[in-house]
Image: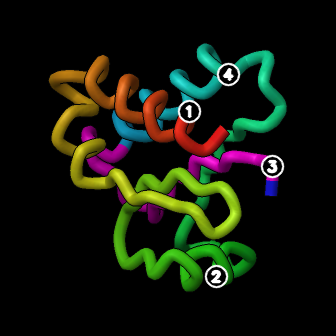
Amino acid sequence: ASVVNVYYFHGKQRCKTCIAVGDVTEKTIKEVYANNPNVKFVEVKTDEKENAGLVEKYEVTWNALIIAKGEDSIEITKQAFANAVNNPEKLTDLIKTEVKKRL
């Protein structure tokens, strides 16, 4: 696998923080990796049947932010939720660091 996927898993009901995690992550990928076809932001709605395979693969039970390239993946959900609202730069830096490790 040559593509780094940044998966943001969420259900229908989303709180302010959940929305912020998705927004910060999507904005980071679109701005920083706009010219890199090997980095993709993937929004995964956990309640949709077609996403069941991914939900199962990453054992997602709630919301999750996972950066993956093939079998090499890291879940950064806790850090994302801790920083998305009040310290989005910290989340942006973490995303960039983890994506860079996998490029």
Q: Position of residue 8 (x, y in %)?
A: 51, 52
Compared with 97, 69 (above or below) is: below
Nearest to viewer (mark 2 / mark 4): 4
Q: Of the residues shown, which amino acid type is indicated by label 2?
A: Ala
Q: Are marks 2 and 4 in contact (CB under 8 Å)?
A: no
Say whether residue 88 is magenta: no
Along the horizontal axis of the image, is 72 left or right of 65?
A: right
Does the rendering let one see residue 23? no
Q: Residues within 10 Å of mark 2 (few under 14, many from 20)?
A: some
**Which residue has dot 2 on it?**
52
In the figure, residue 11 lies in which quadrant? bottom left
Residue located 54% across and 22% down the image: 27
Spatial CA distance of label 2 from label 3 is 23 Å
Q: Residues within 10 Å of mark 3 (few under 14, many from 20)?
A: few
Compared with 43, 75 (above or below) is: below
**Which residue has dot 1 on it?**
100
Which stretch did the figure color magenta? 2-18
Q: Position of residue 9 (x, y in %)?
A: 49, 60
Spatial CA distance of label 2 from label 1 is 28 Å
Q: Number of numbered discs present?
A: 4
Q: Of the residues shown, which amino acid type is indicated by label 4?
A: Tyr
**Which residue has dot 3 on it?**
2
